[in-house]
Amino acid sequence: MTDVVDSDELMRRIQRARACAAEEERSWRARSDELEPTDPQAARDAAVRTLAYEAVTRVLDEVLRPGSR
């Protein structure tokens, strides 16, 4: 893939990726909370995914707004 994009398009793509990661983080957090009483192992797995998406969100935040955290 050799698409050439300008800086505005690159920023839009990063913002979309950040929004997607934040939504996935919320989704996995809710799933973890939902599964905790009935399936602790699945809840732990969901919590790990939550942490992974949280890390991605933080990295993309730093790319978009350096020093904001």
Image: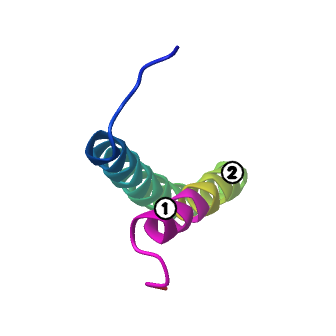
Q: Label 2 is placed on what type of residue?
A: Asp
Q: Residue at x 42, y 20 (%)?
A: 3
The residue tagged with tag 2: helix, strand or loop?
helix
Residue 14 position within the rendered picture, expressed as x and y whole percent measured from the top left: 39, 49
Q: Of all residues shown, which one is farthest toward the top?
A: 1
Instruction: Work out whether residue 57 or residue 12 is closer to the camera in this orientation and state it.
Output: 12
Say how many tags the image has. Answer: 2
Q: Residue at x 66, y 48 (%)?
A: 42
Q: Label 1 is placed on what type of residue?
A: Thr
The residue tagged with tag 1: helix, strand or loop?
helix
Q: What crowding class fits label 1: few (fewer than 14 Cα within 10 Å), some (14-19), or many (20 or more)?
A: many
Residue 44 position within the rendered picture, expressed as x and y whole percent measured from the top left: 69, 58
The span shown in magenta is 55-68
Quarter occupied by residue 61: bottom left
Relative to 52, 21 lies left or right: left
Relative to 10, 50 lies left or right: right
Instruction: Work out whether residue 60 or residue 34 is closer to the camera in this orientation and state it.
Output: 60
Give the label on residue 16, or none. Answer: none
Relative to 9, 60 lies left or right: right
Q: CA distance from mark 2 to mark 1?
A: 19 Å
Q: Is residue 66 one of those drawn in magenta?
A: yes
Give the label on residue 45, or none. Answer: 2
Query: Label 1: which residue?
Result: 57
Determine whether 4 is above or below 39 in the image: above
Which comes sooner in the sequence, label 2 or label 1?
Answer: 2
* Magenta-colored segment: predominant secondary structure: helix
